Image: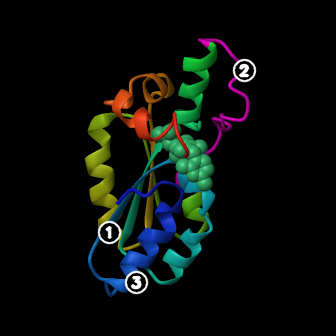
Amino acid sequence: MHYGRGGLPYAVGASVADGRRRPVMLITGDSAFQFHIAELETAARLNLPLVCVVAVDYAWGLEAGVYKRTFGQGSLETGTHWSTNTRLDEVADGFGCHGEYVERDEDIAPAIKRAYASGKTAVIHVAVDPKANSEEMPNYGEYATWATEGAH
Ligand SMILES: Cc1ncc(C[n+]2csc(CCOP(=O)(O)OP(=O)(O)O)c2C)c(N)n1
């Protein structure tokens, strides 16, 4: 499931509502994930079979893209970038969850398998290309007609 900033709480709620047994996957951006990251504690305490796959560009990628389209390459992109030392898999460890760090496409599927096999709530930190993530979003033009150019 993907539901923007509410993704993690909704995933927790869906898993609880479903009886905590079926595997649940949250696919999310890193900024959206950090909105309610403390809900990992809830997921860990309830031992939810939830795997969070987080696309980490260390940025509000959509907003970085808006800066680029509005002001061109090389603007300050103020307020849209995280520290690249941020490690969401290590945050997961701190909550007693299973953490995985992935940089290559081919490592994603094995990490997901290990995550479900761990029997714990898990977070997979997938480092993605910040340039591609803010400049090459598929079908962005259509998305922009109802999202970024209007009300958020
Ligand atoms: C509460 C709220 N604030 C702001 C926005 C506008 N917004 C939409 S996508 C986005 C950036 C999301 O960044 P991230 O989760 O890292 O995903 P990425 O765009 O990098 O793939 C923002 C700020 C929103 N949808 N909801």
Separation (CA) of disc 3 from disc 2: 42 Å
Which residue does the image show at 55% across and 69% down from the upper left?
40
Q: Are marks 3 and 2 in contact (CB under 8 Å)?
A: no
Magenta span of residues: 72-90
Q: Are marks 1 and 3 in contact (CB under 8 Å)?
A: no
Q: Are marks 2 and 1 in contact (CB under 8 Å)?
A: no
User: Which residue is outermost to the bottom?
Assistant: 19
Among the two numbered marks 2 and 1 on one chain, the one whose residue lies closer to the N terminus: 1
Query: Mark 3 highlights which residue?
Result: 16
- Residue 20, position in %: x, y? 35, 83
Query: What secondary structure is the magenta-colored segment mainly?
Result: loop
Q: For this view, does 81 lie left or right of residue 11?
A: right
Which residue does the image show at 44% across and 80% down from the upper left?
47
Separation (CA) of disc 2 from disc 1: 38 Å
Which residue does the image show at 38% across and 69% down from the upper left?
50
Residue 24 numbered tag: 1
Q: In the displayed structure, would residue 68 be above or below residue 105? A: above
- Residue 41, position in %: x, y? 58, 74
Q: In the structure shown, which secondary structural element does the residue marked by tag 1 occupy?
A: strand
Q: In the displayed structure, would residue 100 be above or below residue 8? A: above
Query: Mark 2 highlights which residue?
Result: 76
Label 1 environment density (alpha carbons within 10 Å; few <14, some 14–19, many ≥20):
some
Quadrant of the rendered image containing residue 70 = top right
Among the two numbered marks 1 and 3 on one chain, the one whose residue lies closer to the N terminus: 3
